[in-house]
Image: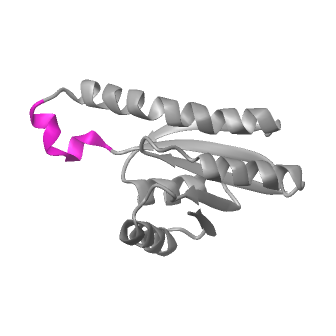
Amino acid sequence: MLKVLIPVLGTQGAIEAARHGAFMFAERCVSNVEIIEVLDDATGSRAVAFHSLSALRRREKHAARDALMQTRAILEDAGVPYTWKRVFGPAERTIAKYAAQSHADIVILDASHLGFFHRWAVLARLWHLSHTPVTMLH
């Protein structure tokens, strides 16, 4: 049985990844799903000069909340046991680090909302940084 990590990037969510995880659970391939909501660390951006860090993080949380709720709803409807956590940092590094820490067997990334070149750049960085297999859905 596999332990699956589903990262939620930005405001688009990971709906396709959640559907895939629910299908794998129904086929008895998955025992547990972990969802991580990856938010960019706002301290590296120029927006910190104009807004407080807490206000920037609050804005990011509100923007991603609906996407996270949809992702969680799909898993709940399918009866998939899952946990979720909010993490801050650059997307690829944070996903690779969390996959190693949590001993995930596979990362399922929903890239349906990413453009062609951005999708391949993310996959290349994850492939370079992570020892955990990555399945990218589009």
| Residue at 51% over, 58% down | 112
Q: Nearer the viewer, residue 72 or 33?
A: 72
Is residue 102 among the parts visible in the rendering? Answer: no
User: In screen coordinates, is 136 left or right of 62?
Assistant: right
Dividing the image into 4 quarters, which one contains the C terminus?
A: bottom right
Residue 40 position in % (x across, y down): 34, 45
The answer to if 96 sits in the magenta stretch is no
- Decide: is 84 above or below 59: below
Q: Is residue 34 visible?
A: yes
Q: Main secondary structure of the magenta part?
A: helix
Image coordinates of residue 31 in percent, x first then y, are 83, 49
Colour mapping: one colour
Percent from the top left, x then y, of residue 25?
A: 83, 50
Q: Is residue 39 above or below residue 108?
A: above
Q: Which residues are magenta?
A: 41-50
- Residue in the image at 10% along x and 31% along y: 50
Number of marks drawn = 0
Residue farthest to the right?
A: 28
Query: What x and y, as percent, mark residue 19?
Result: 70, 49
| Res. 10 image quadrant | top left
Q: Quadrant of the N terminus?
A: bottom right
Q: Is residue 108 above or below residue 121?
A: above
Q: Picture quarter containing residue 117?
A: bottom left
Q: Camera-side residue: 49 or 19?
A: 19
